[in-house]
Amino acid sequence: MKPIALPISVFTILAFALSWSTNRLLPELNVSSLNLKEIITGFGPAMSGLICYKLFGTPNTYKLSLAGSRPALSLGIVALSLALPILCLEKPDPVLWAGFVVTQFVYTLGEELGWRHYLQNAIAPLNGWQQAVFIGFCWFFWHYAILDDPTTMLTGQSAPAFIGIPLMIGLLALLSKLLGDIAIRTQAVFLPVSLHYIGKVGNSYMLLVVFGVVMATHIYFQKLARFNGPGSAESKA
């Protein structure tokens, strides 16, 4: 087994440093209603992953890409997740709201390219739940680069550290297991991005719609893998 401690340590430190420096040191950068500073901050994990792919030659074990092996399906889900908040939420200025939606989607893409594309590949020797717990741990502490107290993410209120930190790590680990399974099965980073991002900008109805479509896609890929047999590309995902 190739040693993984150094790559994942460097990735985690770089992801934090890149996001912290842009979040704390850059001035506000807005183009119309797009928040470029927020987008650059969210791309800390993606840039860290790209650097670590080059530094350590980490293999893309799960053969992940943006749109996966069924790009039309993945892009359709992306279009749905972007359109729902813009079409269904009543806002006084739809252009401003559209800018917010695009900002959050691209920001989330930067996160997921780090957590799902690089880090999940880097810790591929671990089993599924070990991967989820490890990513949940890194994901939580990365939030200190952008938030003073990440334990407020769930309720908006601070919690004692001995309660809030384990709770949030556990929740992010569960989310990582779900998003990781979806990414591995479909080979598409866009699917976990759509699900992750819609929870930030949409209401419960939108979350359920996108979740239902993503899970139906996940089940479809599972059935396709069983149909094609153990030698197929999908069955190895």
Image (cartoon, grey):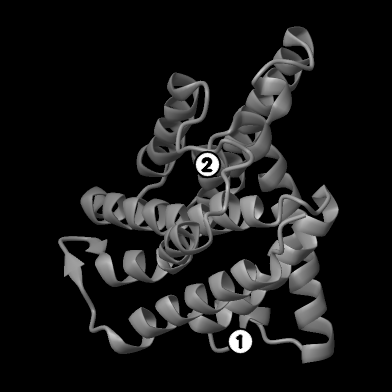
With respect to residue 99, does 80 lie above or below? above
Q: Position of residue 233 (x, y in %)?
A: 64, 20
Q: Is residue 45 left or right of residue 43?
A: right
Q: Which residue is mark 1?
A: 149
Secondary element under disc 2, as helix, strand or loop, is: loop
The residue at the far left in this view is 32
Q: Position of residue 108 (x, y in %)?
A: 46, 56
Q: Is residue 39 left or right of residue 50?
A: left
2 or 1: mark nearer the eye: 2
User: Foreground: 45 or 90?
Assistant: 45
Q: Position of residue 132 (x, y in %)?
A: 76, 57
Real-space Cα separation, disc 2 to disc 1, in angstroms: 28 Å
Q: Which residue is mark 2?
A: 189
Residue 64 position by quadrant: top right
Residue 216 position by quadrant: top right
Give the residue displayed 40% in from the left and 40% down from the top: 82
- Tag 2 near tag 1, CB within 8 Å: no
For residue 134, which numbered disc appears in the image?
none
The residue at the far top in this view is 227
User: Foreground: 96 or 15?
Assistant: 15
Query: Of label 2 and label 1, which has the lower sequence position?
Result: 1
Residue type at numbered disc 1: Asp
Give the residue displayed 46% in from the left and 67% down from the top: 48
User: Foreground: 87 or 73?
Assistant: 73
